[in-house]
Image: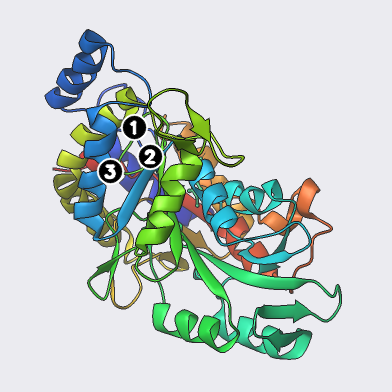
């Protein structure tokens, strides 16, 4: 076991280390245009949530994804709006992956609803659809509005899928399952900008989806996110909800419902416009880096470098290495950190967090095991040329 860790450490330090600079998990790269666009916001005074870059960023995202796009303050806010627009209510449950970033489950909780946790596939990060199908058949009753949990009596109308590390998996089966059980599919696509499934960008499979432009994502706006939807009426609603439900009036501003101040500021959108210009090049490099890791590690026994699923053209946001044991995973994290190479274990599954430990959940033993054995490797696009 330890000899494996030594071999992996040797190969990764050789491949990644240049001079004394620490290697981060995922770092952004800024082009000259970032300076120009941001400077223009400052020079003209348009730094806040009105201004031409917010409109342009929305349009650029829409052109790239083929969906309506509404830029907001962060991915968590985007998820909150998705849940709100799906009509999630305080007395409901929402079927939520247990292996995801905490924002997915928190967005459900913000509406007073309860996440109901679903396991992942064995040694894959996607939902275990067969297990979910059996669970729905055994533990729920089907209604025209969704499924009712036989144990709690609560309705679930929404299923969330997270495209972890940019991988989009088994969408046909998931869509078929949702239509069989009258569930609304929402995509947490925070990690999936630049990922396509059967030629369609993330966000084309659910009713609504959320992107994130946090500093460690593939495109960053500092902090930021977006709601994506193929539905024009929902797009209009998302824009309205994210701009305090303000209605234009020539004399005095009117707000026609309780809503949110979630609009992305112009200065962040300016950065986003510059970043999107570099997305295609970044995607090429990220694919090369994933292939490079593959060739570096393929002859080593008892490890598995997560590959893109069938039919998915992945952005390879973060490369993931899966060990047979937690001890080996932790040993690699320690060993690489001694060389200033930053890696990170996968999030603790949601059903194990203190605020969600009593939430309803199916058996999530596959997620528990996988999360404990996986480490993310440095994945910045510029690590390879
Ligand atoms: C980053 C991320 C989010 C939230 O994004 P923020 O912009 O940080 O609020 C949500 N879900 C997943 C899976 C993420 O990786």
Q: Quadrant of residue 222?
A: top left
Q: Secondary structure at mark 1?
A: loop
Looking at the image, which is closer to me, 127 or 174? 174
Let me know if residue 75 appears in the view: no
Q: Relative to 134, is 66 above or below?
A: above
Secondary element type, mark 3: helix
Residue 215 locus on image (x, y percent): 39, 33
Residue lying at the far front of the rendered structure:
251
**Label 3, on which residue?**
58
Question: 137 and 52: which one is in front?
Answer: 52
Position of residue 154 measured from the top left corner of the image (x, y, whole percent)? 80, 71
Q: Answer few, some or many: residues within 10 Å of disc 1's Cα (few below 14, many 20 plus, some between 14 and 19).
A: many
Q: Residue at x 39, y 71 (%)?
A: 205
Give the alpha-carbon distance from disc 3 to disc 2, as whole Å.
13 Å
Q: Which numbered mark, 1 or 3, is in the foreground of this view?
A: 3
Circle nearer the N terminus (3, 2): 3
Vertically, is 91 above or below 246? below
**Relative to 97, 75 lies left or right:** left
Within the image, what quadrant is residue 142 found in? Answer: bottom right
Would residue 276 be seen by someone viewing this image from the given angle?
yes
Whether label 1 touches label 2, CB < 8 Å: yes
The mark tally for this picture is 3
The residue where tag 1 is placed is: 221
Residue 213: which disc? Answer: 2
């Amino acid at each position: 076991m330890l000899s494996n860790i030594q071999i992996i450490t040797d190969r990764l330090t050789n491949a990644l280390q240049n001079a004394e600079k620490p290697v981060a998990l995922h770092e952004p790269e800024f082009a000259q245009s970032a300076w120009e666009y941001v400077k223009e916001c400052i020079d003209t005074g348009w730094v806040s949530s009105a201004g031409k870059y917010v409109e342009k960023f929305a349009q650029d995202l829409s052109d790239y994804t083929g969906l309506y796009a509404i830029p907001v303050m962060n991915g968590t806010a985007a998820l909150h709006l998705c849940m709100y627009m799906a009509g999630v209510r305080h007395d409901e449950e929402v079927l939520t992956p247990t292996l995801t970033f905490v924002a997915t489950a928190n967005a459900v909780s913000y509406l007073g609803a309860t996440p109901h946790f679903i396991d992942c596939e064995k040694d894959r990060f996607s939902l275990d659809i067969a297990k979910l199908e059996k669970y729905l058949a055994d533990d729920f009753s089907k209604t025209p509005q969704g499924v009712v949990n036989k144990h709690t009596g609560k309705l679930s109308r929404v299923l969330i899928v997270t495209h972890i590390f940019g991988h989009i998996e088994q969408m046909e089966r998931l869509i078929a399952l949702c239509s069989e059980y009258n569930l609304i599919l929402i995509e947490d696509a925070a990690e999936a900008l630049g990922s396509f499934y059967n030629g369609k960008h993330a966000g084309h499979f659910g009713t609504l989806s959320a992107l994130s432009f946090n500093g460690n994502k593939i495109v960053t706006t500092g902090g930021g996110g977006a709601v994506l939807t193929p539905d024009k009426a929902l797009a209009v609603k998302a824009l309205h909800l994210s701009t305090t439900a303000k209605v234009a009036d020539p004399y005095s501003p009117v707000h026609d419902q309780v809503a949110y101040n979630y609009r992305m500021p112009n200065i962040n959108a300016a950065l986003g416009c510059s970043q999107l210009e570099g997305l295609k090049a970044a995607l090429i490099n990220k694919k090369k880096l994933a292939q490079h890791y593959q060739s570096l590690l393929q002859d080593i026994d008892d490890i598995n470098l997560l590959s893109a699923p069938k039919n998915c053209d992945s952005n390879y946001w973060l490369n993931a290495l899966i060990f047979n044991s937690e001890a080996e995973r932790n040993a690699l994290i320690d060993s690489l950190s001694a060389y200033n190479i930053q890696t990170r274990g996968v999030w603790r599954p949601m059903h194990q967090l203190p605020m969600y430990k009593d939430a309803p959940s199916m058996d999530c033993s596959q997620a528990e095991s996988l999360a404990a054995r996986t480490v993310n490797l440095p994945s910045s696009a510029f690590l390879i040329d």
